[in-house]
Amino acid sequence: MKLLYVGETWLGSCARSMREALSRRPGVTLEEFPEDAWFPARESLVLRAMNRLSRPMRMRGFRAGLLEAATRSRPDAVMTYKGTHVDTPALRALKKAGVATVNVYPDCSPHSSGVTHRSAVGEYDLVLSTKPFHPARWKDVYGYDNACEFVPQG
């Protein structure tokens, strides 16, 4: 299986650990698209303000880069770890190109990270949640129609 993996790469992140584990699986070919390369965390107030002002431009670049990487590598699936910056237009373009979309969801609520993320979570073909209560609540509580399966983390 050929995967295009989208996630953070900083040492200690769960996304990085997942990527490393997937890369050791026989039969899995992995290409990485590092989310944090486009959206670096900054401590300084000035840098945070600059990040906020440049966010729309970086989102367009991130989306275009992701679609270019998917076109170039032609993966069986794009897998995101949470996918904070993967928006609805990007997911729809990937699916239009015939690429399956999978999200590994580590948080308690997909509604807690803003409206862009909230709507995007419902666009994935499959969500693999690390929370055992998500599948039962996926449609009724969160309002999603896509598939959600529980897969324990670790």
Image (cartoon, rainbow, N blue to C red):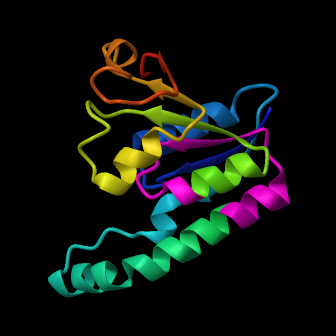
Image height of 122 relative to 68, above or below: above
Relative to the observer, which residue lies in front, 101 or 15? 101
Image height of 114 relative to 41, above or below: above
Q: Quadrant of the N terminus?
A: top right
Q: Residue at x 77, y 32 (%)?
A: 28
Quarter of the view holding residue 56: bottom left
Residue 31 visible here? no
Pinpoint residue 52: horizontal percent, then vertical percent.
29, 78
Farthest left residue in view:
45
Residue 106 visible here? yes
Q: Residue at x 20, y 87 (%)?
A: 46
Quarter of the view holding residue 62: bottom right
Q: Is residue 72 inside the magenta stretch?
A: yes
Pinpoint residue 20: horizontal percent, then vertical percent.
59, 39
Image height of 87 relative to 63, above or below: above
Q: Residue at x 47, y 82 (%)?
A: 57
Judged left or right of residue 48, residue 54 is right
The residue stretch that appears in magenta: 67-89
Q: Quadrant of the C terminus?
A: top left
Quarter of the view holding residue 70: bottom right
Q: Residue at x 83, y 50 (%)?
A: 74
Pinpoint residue 87: horizontal percent, then vertical percent.
49, 56
Pinpoint residue 153: horizontal percent, then vertical percent.
42, 22
Q: Is residue 119 inside the magenta stretch?
A: no
Judged left or right of residue 107, residue 35 is right
Judged left or right of residue 71, residue 127 is left
